[in-house]
Structures are given as C-alpha cells and as structure tokens.
Image: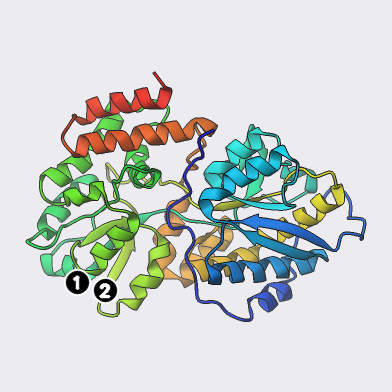
Amino acid sequence: MISPARPPARRIAALLTGTIALVLAATGCGGKTGAGSATGKITSITALDYYTDEREHTHWGEVLAACGKTAGVRVEQTSVPGASLIPKVLQRASSRTLPDLLMLDNPDLQQIAQTGALTPLDQYGIDSSGFTKGILSAGTYQGKVYGLAPAVSTIALFYNKDMLAEAGVAVPGTWDELKAAAAKLARPGRYGMAVDANPTFEGTWQFLPFLWSNGGDEKKLDTPEAAKALQLWVDLVKSGSMSKSVLNWTQADVHDQFVAGRTAMMINGPWRIPALKQAEKLHWGVAPIPVPRTGQTPVTPLGGEVWTVPRSPSKARQEKAAQVLACLNDHSTMRTLAEQHFTVPSRTAVAARYAEQTPSMAAFVQSVEAARARTSQLGVKWPKAATGIYTAMQSALTGRQTPEEALRHGQQIATGH
C-alpha cells in the first residue's frame, strides 16, 4: 500500500525546559476511561513515534513520562525515522506486536485503522469535545475516532514588512491583490512571492489552500475551479513575480529565500518561526493565505500527529495507554506542547487563548478553524490524488500543458485510468 506523506517540517526542535515534566505533572492532566480501571499489575507501557531529533525525542519523552505518571505507569518510548514508521507499524500489526501507544502522522491513520489494528477511543470514555470538525476528521475512520492530535499545524502567508512598506503594498487578502502585490514587489534579485511546488506531497500540501478555497475538490481534479487555482500559480511564474525554481524548492528552500531577502512573501508554516526570530534584522508578519474573493475564508490543510491505542491482548494495557493519550490531549498539555513547538492547540478554546497571547500564531489559529484533513474526502485513496495534483502542477508550471490539460492528466493518475 502507498504510504501517505507526512506533513511538512512537522518535527521542529524547540527550546527545552528542564521543568516541562514537572509542569505537566503539576497540572494533573489525564482523562477518565470508560472501561474500568486497570488491574494494577501494569507498571509500564510502550510508545512508538517518529521524533528522532535528539531534543525533540527528549522533550516528548518528558511529556510521556509526566502523563504516564498520572496513569501510574512508566512509558517506554521508542522513536524511529519517519520513513520507516509505517512499514514497521504494518509489520508489527501483522505479528500482533504493536506498542501500547502509537503516534501516527494524521494522513496515515486511515491506512492503519483500515487494517483493524487500532481501537476506537470512545470505548475508553476519552473526551473529544472542543475539537474542530477538521481535526476530529483527521483522526476518524468510518465514523469512529481512532486518534486525537494534541496540536496541529497549517500554512499561511509570511511577508517582509519593510519590503511591503517600501513598495507601498498592503498585505494581500485576495488573489488579485496577491498578483498585484507580487508584481510590484519583484525586482532584480528579488521575487515577490515564493511557494514550494516540487513534485512531492509537500508541493501538493502547499497548493491545497488555493485548490480548496476556490471550490476545487481532490475527488475530481479536472474542474474549472481547480484550473483557475493552478492558473494563478502559472501567472505568477510567467509574469516573473515568482521564480521558476519553485518547481524544485522545498519549504526549507522557500524559507531560506525569504530570510535572504530574495522573496518578499512566502507560503510556509509556523515551524519556521523559531528560525525567523533569530534573523534579527528581518521584520516579518503573518497573514491568512489570500482567497479568490473578498470575504472568503481560506481552507488550508491540517498537519500534525495523532495518538492512538492499538489493539492488544491486554485490556489493562489498553486502558493505561488510553489514560496517557487523554493526558496528552488535556487542555494544559496541548497548550504546553503548542508553546514549545509553535503549533496550534487542537481544542478551540485553548487555541483562542493561545492566539491572544502569541500574536505570531494568530493567523494559524484562525486558519485551523476551517482547515481540512487531507484524507477527509478520499481516505486511503488520498495518496493517488496527491500524486495527481503535484504532477499537474509540474506540467502546468513548466508550460508543457495548460492547467486544464495538466489537471485532466492528474485526474487520470488519481483514479488509475
């Protein structure tokens, strides 16, 4: 089976605080479970994730330890490289040796839940209230919630305040304003706008806000709405407002172009904020991604990981894992995680308070309210559609095909015929 892509740059090593475990433990975070208490004989459980960065692994280890303490167990954490997580999970699922607590990138949940390896969270009485529809959808398979994300991410428009002020350009809110602003900001050695349009799921991720906000749909790519969204990117490149190199840039490359002053605006995620703050002479701002028409709300993709409870011969171990999962999704824990990793708390009320106190995250919090899970429409068929989208992007931006022709071909890839 094809493994869906992980959301871009999700693993950002944050500054660690040695007191995080104490902070989490002090909050008493944890959730009540519905299937009765564990036997008391369970003293440890296992957890698997892809947080291999040393500082990030340590940080999550502290969080898991604190939540394990509330459940009365020690959490034995194992982290594997992101690319090997799903193959390992599928292998262990077939041999029935999955960990007690499993982290998955949200697009991967559908594939794993389909195998029957996960347990629905409602059987443990875990509180899933206060999450937006999109976030719950990311952890849902066939109407059942199998995973919950303590925090999520999405993308927005970063802009150079000094460059916009010098050019007399307002922060664009619509596509027409974006085209005009990018053209006015472009000059020798500098482009007005930058995106990641490379031939990977990361490129698809960046295009989705334009596709979705214009009424396009991954279920049928060859529509006028999708063509108009792709035409916008084609126009930006043809006019010289955007570099042709976006065909190969990653989101990290786009970030580097922005920091170096070679682009005045870029589409990127909040994981870039720690590095941007280190660029002392760079004065930047963040706004929602421009929409086709005034008054619309951008529809952006959700990134982030969900935590799940795999099936186990031991109900007691499942109960303990569920208690730890509930703690990870407790109000105070998700707020702490968001502050450390520049992500958005998944519960709406927590996110709203977070945005008030962290202005640089306000645009992301606003966008998450209407954000959509990539698998919400197609489930396990999403990877083929994602491939069709980035293939169409490449064909149109290189001029090999018109947006309409490129998307017809993309639809053929998505459907397999």
Q: Is residue 316 above or below residue 313?
A: below
Q: Could you give the CA–CA distance between mark 1 and mark 2, rounded to whole angstroms?
A: 7 Å
Q: Is residue 124 rendered to the left or right of residue 54? A: right
Residue picked out by circle 1: 162
Please, which residue is most extreme toward the left here? 188
Q: Earlier along the polypeptide chain: callout 1 or callout 2?
A: 1
Answer whether residue 215 is visible to the viewer in this image.
no
Q: Position of residue 416 (x, y in %)?
A: 41, 22
Q: Is mark 1 in CB contact (under 8 Å) with mark 2?
A: yes
Q: Which colour scheme is used?
A: rainbow
Q: Position of residue 35 (x, y in %)?
A: 86, 47
146 and 257: which is toward the camera: 257
Q: Is residue 284 above or below residue 394?
A: below
163 and 249: which is toward the camera: 249
The residue at the point 13 percent across, 62 percent down is 190
Please, which residue is most extreme toward the top here? 417
Quarter the N terminus occupies: top right
Number of the label disc, if any, that sits on residue 283: 2
Q: Position of residue 110 (x, y in %)?
A: 59, 37
- Where disc 1 sits, the SS reads helix
